[in-house]
Amino acid sequence: DTGVSQDPRHKITKRGQNVTFRCDPISEHNRLYWYRQTLGQGPEFLTYFQNEAQLEKSRLLSDRFSAERPKGSFSTLEIQRTEQGDSAMYLCASSPFPTGEETQYFGPGTRLLVL
Amino acid sequence: AQSVTQPDIHITVSEGASLELRCNYSYGATPYLFWYVQSPGQGLQLLLKYFSGDTLVQGIKGFEAEFKRSQSSFNLRKPSVHWSDAAEYFCAVVASGGSYIPTFGRGTSLIVHP
C-alpha cells in the first residue's frame, strides 16, 4: 500500500493558462475525492467518483473545472483559463466503499499558484 | 446539512504540557467524526475516528478523543505534547448513510514552545 499520490506537488502558472493535476488513489479504493484548501481554511469538497462515475459535484466546481476518472483508477482535475482566485492546495483522497466505516485517505496535495 | 466549529484558531502550549483541541458539530443524528493532522505543505493524516460504540477513541501518536452527544462535541486530547506535534488539526463530520462527504472545520493551529 503506497498511499495516495498526487502530481505535480507544485504548479505555478499564469492567469488564463490551463493546468491539469493527477491523483493516483490507493489501489482497490473505488471512491476518489477532490478538495480545495485555501490558506487558513479546512478542505472544501469539489467532486467525487465511485469507480469511473462522477457522482457529485460541488457548487465550487465552476464550468472551468473538469474532472475525470476514465478507468476507475487514477483521476485528473483540469482547470481551464485559470484565475488568481484558483490559487490553492488541491487535495485528493480515496476510500474503500462500502465498508461501513467510511475513512478517506489523503494525498500530499498539489499547490497551485496563479500569477 | 452538517457543520463543524473549531473555536480556537491558534493554541499555544509548552512541550510536555497537556492539550485539548475543541470541536463542536451540528447534525441531527449521530455522525461519523474524524480528526486529521496536517503538517505545513502536506496532505491530511488521519489521527482517529468515531463511528459507534465506546465514546473514548484512541488514535495514533498518543492522541485520544471523546464523543459527547449531549454537548455535540468531539474534543481531541493528548496528555503530553511533543514539539513534533506542532501542526494544523482539523475536525471533520460525516453524515452517516449519505454520500460520506466530510465537512471540515477551519482548523486549529498548534504551536509548541520548548
Image (spheres, rainbow, N blue to C red):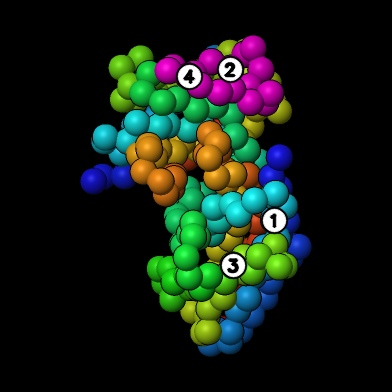
Q: Amino acid at mark 3?
A: Phe
| Residue A52 makes an appearance in the image | yes
Give the residue furthest to the left.
A1
Secondary structure type for disc 3 = strand
Left or right for B29, reference A28: right
User: Which mark sits nearer the N-terminus, 2 or 4?
Assistant: 4
Asked if residue A56 is positioned above or below residue B60 in the image, the reply reads above
Secondary structure type for disc 4 = strand
* Marking on residue B25: 1
Residue B114 drawn at (x, y percent)? 56, 84
Closest to the observer: B85 or A45? A45
Closest to the observer: B55 or B93? B55
- How far apart are the alpha carbons under marks 3 and 4? 33 Å
Q: Which residue is mark 2?
A: A65
Tag in front: 1 or 2: 1
Asked if residue B25 is positioned above or below residue A62 in the image, the reply reads below
- How far apart are the alpha carbons under marks 1 and 4? 28 Å
Task: Please say whether residue A56 is one of the residues in the magenta stretch.
Answer: yes
Asked if residue A8 is positioned above or below residue B83 in the image, the reply reads above
Tag in front: 2 or 4: 4
Q: Amino acid at mark 4?
A: Gln
Label 4: chain? A
* Residue occupying image coordinates x 45% and y 56%: B46
Q: Amino acid at mark 1?
A: Tyr
Q: Which residue is mark 4?
A: A54
Q: Which residue is mark 3?
A: B67
